Image (spheres, rainbow, N blue to C red):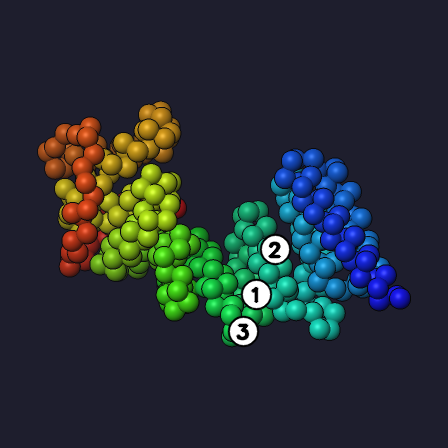
Amino acid sequence: MAMAANGQNADVAAIDCNIGDAYLSMGRYDEAIFAYQKALNTFKLCRGENHPSVASVFVRLADLYNKIGKFSESKSYCENALRIYAKPTPGSPPEEIASGLVDISTIYESMNEPDRALELLQKAIKVYGNAPGQQSIIAGIEAQMGVLYYILGSYSESYNALKSATSKFRSTGDKKSALFGIALNQMGLACVQLFMINEAADLFEEARNILEAECGPYHADTLGVYSNLAGTYDAMGRTVDAIEILEYVVEMREEKLGTANPDVEDEKRRLAELLKEAGMVRTRKSRSLETLLVKNSHNIIPYDIEVM
Protein backbone atom coordinates (compact mmCIF):
# COMPACT_ATOMS: atom_id res chain seq x y z
CA MET A 1 0.00 0.00 0.00
CA ALA A 2 2.81 2.39 0.90
CA MET A 3 4.51 1.78 -2.45
CA ALA A 4 1.24 2.45 -4.29
CA ALA A 5 0.72 5.67 -2.33
CA ASN A 6 4.28 6.78 -3.13
CA GLY A 7 3.66 6.09 -6.79
CA GLN A 8 0.49 8.17 -6.74
CA ASN A 9 2.26 11.01 -4.94
CA ALA A 10 5.05 10.90 -7.52
CA ASP A 11 2.46 11.18 -10.29
CA VAL A 12 0.95 14.22 -8.57
CA ALA A 13 4.41 15.80 -8.26
CA ALA A 14 5.06 15.19 -11.96
CA ILE A 15 1.79 16.96 -12.77
CA ASP A 16 2.82 19.88 -10.59
CA CYS A 17 6.08 20.07 -12.57
CA ASN A 18 4.10 20.23 -15.82
CA ILE A 19 1.92 22.96 -14.34
CA GLY A 20 5.04 24.87 -13.31
CA ASP A 21 6.47 24.49 -16.80
CA ALA A 22 3.26 25.92 -18.28
CA TYR A 23 3.29 28.90 -15.92
CA LEU A 24 6.99 29.48 -16.70
CA SER A 25 6.29 29.53 -20.44
CA MET A 26 3.63 32.21 -19.84
CA GLY A 27 5.94 34.31 -17.69
CA ARG A 28 3.82 33.73 -14.57
CA TYR A 29 6.83 33.18 -12.38
CA ASP A 30 5.30 33.30 -8.90
CA GLU A 31 2.77 30.63 -9.83
CA ALA A 32 5.51 28.55 -11.44
CA ILE A 33 7.60 28.74 -8.27
CA PHE A 34 4.63 27.65 -6.17
CA ALA A 35 4.00 24.64 -8.41
CA TYR A 36 7.66 23.64 -8.43
CA GLN A 37 7.92 23.93 -4.65
CA LYS A 38 4.89 21.66 -4.27
CA ALA A 39 6.49 19.12 -6.57
CA LEU A 40 9.80 19.42 -4.72
CA ASN A 41 8.26 18.69 -1.33
CA THR A 42 6.25 15.76 -2.66
CA PHE A 43 9.22 14.16 -4.41
CA LYS A 44 11.32 14.50 -1.24
CA LEU A 45 8.64 12.73 0.80
CA CYS A 46 7.92 9.87 -1.60
CA ARG A 47 11.32 9.30 -3.21
CA GLY A 48 13.90 10.69 -0.81
CA GLU A 49 16.16 13.71 -0.63
CA ASN A 50 18.76 12.36 -3.08
CA HIS A 51 16.52 11.13 -5.87
CA PRO A 52 17.12 12.57 -9.37
CA SER A 53 13.45 13.67 -9.44
CA VAL A 54 14.25 16.11 -6.64
CA ALA A 55 17.30 17.32 -8.55
CA SER A 56 15.18 17.84 -11.70
CA VAL A 57 12.93 20.25 -9.80
CA PHE A 58 15.98 22.10 -8.48
CA VAL A 59 17.11 22.46 -12.11
CA ARG A 60 13.70 23.86 -13.09
CA LEU A 61 13.88 26.40 -10.27
CA ALA A 62 17.45 27.30 -11.26
CA ASP A 63 16.31 27.90 -14.83
CA LEU A 64 13.42 30.06 -13.66
CA TYR A 65 15.55 32.26 -11.41
CA ASN A 66 18.14 32.57 -14.17
CA LYS A 67 15.43 33.79 -16.55
CA ILE A 68 14.34 36.54 -14.13
CA GLY A 69 17.92 37.64 -13.44
CA LYS A 70 18.26 36.28 -9.90
CA PHE A 71 21.57 34.58 -10.56
CA SER A 72 22.57 33.93 -6.96
CA GLU A 73 19.36 31.98 -6.34
CA SER A 74 19.81 30.19 -9.66
CA LYS A 75 23.32 29.06 -8.78
CA SER A 76 22.15 27.90 -5.36
CA TYR A 77 19.53 25.63 -6.93
CA CYS A 78 22.11 24.40 -9.46
CA GLU A 79 24.47 23.40 -6.67
CA ASN A 80 21.63 21.65 -4.80
CA ALA A 81 20.95 19.59 -7.91
CA LEU A 82 24.64 18.86 -8.46
CA ARG A 83 25.01 17.52 -4.90
CA ILE A 84 22.27 15.00 -5.69
CA TYR A 85 23.77 14.06 -9.05
CA ALA A 86 27.13 13.47 -7.31
CA LYS A 87 25.58 10.92 -4.89
CA PRO A 88 22.20 9.88 -6.26
CA THR A 89 19.88 7.24 -4.85
CA PRO A 90 21.19 3.76 -5.77
CA GLY A 91 19.68 2.51 -9.00
CA SER A 92 19.11 5.99 -10.44
CA PRO A 93 19.16 5.93 -14.27
CA PRO A 94 22.50 7.34 -15.51
CA GLU A 95 20.74 8.94 -18.49
CA GLU A 96 18.63 11.05 -16.12
CA ILE A 97 21.73 12.23 -14.26
CA ALA A 98 23.63 13.03 -17.46
CA SER A 99 20.64 14.92 -18.86
CA GLY A 100 20.45 16.99 -15.68
CA LEU A 101 24.15 17.84 -15.91
CA VAL A 102 23.63 19.04 -19.49
CA ASP A 103 20.68 21.22 -18.41
CA ILE A 104 22.73 22.81 -15.62
CA SER A 105 25.58 23.38 -18.05
CA THR A 106 23.22 25.36 -20.27
CA ILE A 107 22.27 27.56 -17.32
CA TYR A 108 25.92 28.30 -16.47
CA GLU A 109 26.68 28.99 -20.11
CA SER A 110 23.85 31.55 -20.23
CA MET A 111 25.37 33.19 -17.14
CA ASN A 112 28.63 33.58 -19.09
CA GLU A 113 30.51 30.90 -17.16
CA PRO A 114 31.81 28.72 -20.02
CA ASP A 115 34.48 27.01 -17.87
CA ARG A 116 31.87 25.71 -15.44
CA ALA A 117 29.53 24.78 -18.29
CA LEU A 118 32.31 22.82 -20.00
CA GLU A 119 33.20 20.98 -16.79
CA LEU A 120 29.60 19.79 -16.43
CA LEU A 121 29.43 18.58 -20.03
CA GLN A 122 32.62 16.59 -19.46
CA LYS A 123 30.97 14.94 -16.45
CA ALA A 124 27.86 14.18 -18.52
CA ILE A 125 29.99 12.42 -21.14
CA LYS A 126 31.57 10.26 -18.41
CA VAL A 127 28.15 9.32 -17.06
CA TYR A 128 26.96 8.25 -20.50
CA GLY A 129 30.19 6.40 -21.17
CA ASN A 130 29.87 4.15 -24.19
CA ALA A 131 26.22 3.38 -23.55
CA PRO A 132 24.59 1.85 -26.66
CA GLY A 133 21.87 3.90 -28.29
CA GLN A 134 23.19 7.16 -26.84
CA GLN A 135 25.73 8.08 -29.50
CA SER A 136 23.56 10.80 -31.05
CA ILE A 137 23.08 12.41 -27.64
CA ILE A 138 26.80 12.16 -26.89
CA ALA A 139 27.55 13.71 -30.29
CA GLY A 140 25.32 16.67 -29.38
CA ILE A 141 27.15 17.11 -26.08
CA GLU A 142 30.54 16.96 -27.79
CA ALA A 143 29.38 19.53 -30.32
CA GLN A 144 28.41 21.89 -27.50
CA MET A 145 31.78 21.24 -25.85
CA GLY A 146 33.38 22.27 -29.13
CA VAL A 147 31.48 25.57 -29.02
CA LEU A 148 32.59 26.22 -25.43
CA TYR A 149 36.23 25.39 -26.19
CA TYR A 150 36.00 27.85 -29.09
CA ILE A 151 34.60 30.56 -26.81
CA LEU A 152 37.50 29.94 -24.41
CA GLY A 153 40.02 30.24 -27.26
CA SER A 154 41.06 26.56 -27.08
CA TYR A 155 40.81 25.98 -30.81
CA SER A 156 42.59 22.64 -31.01
CA GLU A 157 40.32 21.21 -28.31
CA SER A 158 37.34 22.73 -30.10
CA TYR A 159 38.34 21.08 -33.36
CA ASN A 160 38.89 17.69 -31.71
CA ALA A 161 35.55 17.76 -29.88
CA LEU A 162 33.69 18.75 -33.03
CA LYS A 163 35.51 16.16 -35.12
CA SER A 164 34.44 13.47 -32.67
CA ALA A 165 30.88 14.80 -32.70
CA THR A 166 30.60 14.95 -36.48
CA SER A 167 32.05 11.44 -36.80
CA LYS A 168 29.33 10.16 -34.47
CA PHE A 169 26.65 12.04 -36.39
CA ARG A 170 27.85 10.39 -39.60
CA SER A 171 27.98 6.91 -38.08
CA THR A 172 24.52 7.17 -36.52
CA GLY A 173 22.81 8.38 -39.68
CA ASP A 174 22.25 11.95 -38.45
CA LYS A 175 24.40 13.48 -41.17
CA LYS A 176 21.49 15.38 -42.69
CA SER A 177 20.18 17.04 -39.54
CA ALA A 178 20.36 20.79 -38.92
CA LEU A 179 22.40 20.12 -35.75
CA PHE A 180 24.98 18.29 -37.85
CA GLY A 181 25.15 21.26 -40.22
CA ILE A 182 25.66 23.66 -37.33
CA ALA A 183 28.40 21.43 -35.90
CA LEU A 184 30.16 21.40 -39.28
CA ASN A 185 29.98 25.19 -39.40
CA GLN A 186 31.51 25.50 -35.94
CA MET A 187 34.22 23.02 -36.88
CA GLY A 188 34.95 25.18 -39.91
CA LEU A 189 35.42 28.19 -37.64
CA ALA A 190 37.88 26.21 -35.52
CA CYS A 191 39.76 25.28 -38.70
CA VAL A 192 40.01 28.96 -39.63
CA GLN A 193 41.62 29.73 -36.26
CA LEU A 194 44.05 26.85 -36.81
CA PHE A 195 44.90 28.12 -40.34
CA MET A 196 43.39 24.97 -41.91
CA ILE A 197 41.67 27.05 -44.57
CA ASN A 198 41.08 24.30 -47.14
CA GLU A 199 39.31 22.08 -44.63
CA ALA A 200 37.34 25.10 -43.39
CA ALA A 201 36.02 25.77 -46.89
CA ASP A 202 35.01 22.11 -47.31
CA LEU A 203 33.18 22.13 -43.96
CA PHE A 204 31.35 25.39 -44.67
CA GLU A 205 30.27 24.08 -48.08
CA GLU A 206 28.93 20.85 -46.56
CA ALA A 207 27.23 22.77 -43.77
CA ARG A 208 25.62 25.08 -46.31
CA ASN A 209 24.23 22.20 -48.34
CA ILE A 210 22.72 20.57 -45.24
CA LEU A 211 21.20 23.77 -43.84
CA GLU A 212 19.80 24.77 -47.22
CA ALA A 213 17.98 21.43 -47.34
CA GLU A 214 16.89 21.35 -43.68
CA CYS A 215 16.22 25.03 -42.90
CA GLY A 216 15.99 26.72 -46.29
CA PRO A 217 18.30 29.26 -47.97
CA TYR A 218 16.80 32.23 -46.09
CA HIS A 219 17.16 30.87 -42.55
CA ALA A 220 19.48 32.78 -40.20
CA ASP A 221 21.72 29.73 -39.64
CA THR A 222 22.06 29.18 -43.39
CA LEU A 223 22.88 32.84 -43.99
CA GLY A 224 25.50 32.64 -41.23
CA VAL A 225 27.22 29.78 -43.04
CA TYR A 226 27.05 31.73 -46.33
CA SER A 227 28.77 34.62 -44.60
CA ASN A 228 31.49 32.37 -43.17
CA LEU A 229 32.02 30.79 -46.58
CA ALA A 230 32.33 34.23 -48.18
CA GLY A 231 35.03 35.19 -45.68
CA THR A 232 36.88 31.95 -46.35
CA TYR A 233 36.72 32.37 -50.13
CA ASP A 234 38.07 35.89 -49.71
CA ALA A 235 40.93 34.53 -47.61
CA MET A 236 41.70 32.03 -50.37
CA GLY A 237 41.90 34.80 -52.95
CA ARG A 238 38.55 33.88 -54.51
CA THR A 239 37.28 37.45 -54.29
CA VAL A 240 34.63 37.20 -57.02
CA ASP A 241 33.11 34.09 -55.41
CA ALA A 242 33.15 35.81 -52.02
CA ILE A 243 31.41 38.88 -53.48
CA GLU A 244 28.65 36.80 -55.08
CA ILE A 245 27.86 35.06 -51.80
CA LEU A 246 28.07 38.26 -49.76
CA GLU A 247 25.77 40.12 -52.15
CA TYR A 248 23.22 37.36 -51.64
CA VAL A 249 23.64 37.50 -47.84
CA VAL A 250 23.24 41.28 -47.75
CA GLU A 251 20.14 41.13 -49.92
CA MET A 252 18.53 38.48 -47.72
CA ARG A 253 19.44 40.26 -44.49
CA GLU A 254 18.04 43.53 -45.82
CA GLU A 255 14.76 41.79 -46.63
CA LYS A 256 14.52 40.08 -43.25
CA LEU A 257 16.06 42.63 -40.88
CA GLY A 258 15.85 45.98 -42.66
CA THR A 259 18.62 48.12 -44.05
CA ALA A 260 19.39 49.87 -40.74
CA ASN A 261 20.02 46.69 -38.72
CA PRO A 262 23.60 46.53 -37.31
CA ASP A 263 24.14 43.03 -38.73
CA VAL A 264 23.16 44.27 -42.18
CA GLU A 265 25.47 47.25 -41.85
CA ASP A 266 28.40 44.99 -40.96
CA GLU A 267 27.77 42.75 -43.98
CA LYS A 268 27.41 45.80 -46.26
CA ARG A 269 30.70 47.16 -44.98
CA ARG A 270 32.44 43.87 -45.74
CA LEU A 271 30.85 43.78 -49.18
CA ALA A 272 31.88 47.37 -49.93
CA GLU A 273 35.49 46.58 -49.01
CA LEU A 274 35.55 43.54 -51.27
CA LEU A 275 33.97 45.44 -54.15
CA LYS A 276 36.48 48.23 -53.78
CA GLU A 277 39.38 45.76 -53.81
CA ALA A 278 38.01 44.12 -56.95
CA GLY A 279 37.11 47.40 -58.67
CA MET A 280 33.47 46.34 -58.91
CA VAL A 281 30.09 47.78 -57.94
CA ARG A 282 27.26 46.05 -56.14
CA THR A 283 24.63 44.28 -58.21
CA ARG A 284 21.09 44.27 -56.85
CA LYS A 285 20.01 40.97 -58.38
CA SER A 286 21.46 38.00 -56.55
CA ARG A 287 23.11 35.36 -58.66
CA SER A 288 23.05 31.58 -58.35
CA LEU A 289 25.30 30.14 -55.68
CA GLU A 290 25.51 26.72 -57.28
CA THR A 291 28.74 27.53 -59.12
CA LEU A 292 30.60 28.41 -55.91
CA LEU A 293 31.41 24.88 -54.76
CA VAL A 294 34.74 24.66 -56.62
CA LYS A 295 37.52 23.88 -54.14
CA ASN A 296 40.76 25.80 -53.96
CA SER A 297 44.16 24.60 -52.72
CA HIS A 298 45.52 27.92 -51.44
CA ASN A 299 46.29 28.24 -47.74
CA ILE A 300 45.85 31.88 -46.65
CA ILE A 301 44.82 33.38 -43.30
CA PRO A 302 41.14 34.44 -43.54
CA TYR A 303 40.03 38.03 -43.67
CA ASP A 304 36.85 38.07 -41.60
CA ILE A 305 34.79 35.14 -40.37
CA GLU A 306 31.52 35.48 -38.48
CA VAL A 307 30.83 33.28 -35.42
CA MET A 308 27.26 31.92 -35.39
Task: Name the amino acid, label 1.
Answer: Ala
Mark 2 highlights which residue?
A: 104
Q: Position of residue 250 (x, y in %)?
A: 28, 33
Q: Position of residue 142 (x, y in %)?
A: 46, 63
Residue 152, compared with residue 4, is above or below; it is: above
Q: Secondary structure at mark 2?
A: helix
Q: Secondary structure at mark 1?
A: helix
Sequence-first disc among 2 and 1: 2
* Marks 2 and 3 close (CB-CB < 8 Å): no
Task: Determine crowd level at label 1: few under 14, some 14-19, many 20+ residues with C-alpha closer than 10 A.
Answer: many
Disc 1 to disc 3, C-alpha distance? 12 Å
**Disc marking residue 124:** 1
Disc 2 to disc 3, C-alpha distance? 21 Å
Q: Is residue 223 left or right of residue 80?
A: left
Residue located 64% across and 47% down the image: 63
Circle nearer the viewer, 1 or 3: 3
Q: Quadrant of residue 195?
A: bottom left
* Marks 2 and 1 close (CB-CB < 8 Å): no
Q: Quadrant of residue 152?
A: bottom left
Quadrant of the image containing the N terminus: bottom right
Q: Secondary structure at mark 3?
A: loop
Task: Name the amino acid, label 2.
Answer: Ile
Circle nearer the viewer, 2 or 3: 3
Residue 118, compared with residue 91, is above or below; it is: above
Q: Position of residue 302 (x, y in %)?
A: 24, 50
Residue located 27% across and 31% down the image: 251
Disc 2 to disc 1, C-alpha distance? 10 Å
Mark 3 highlights which residue?
A: 131
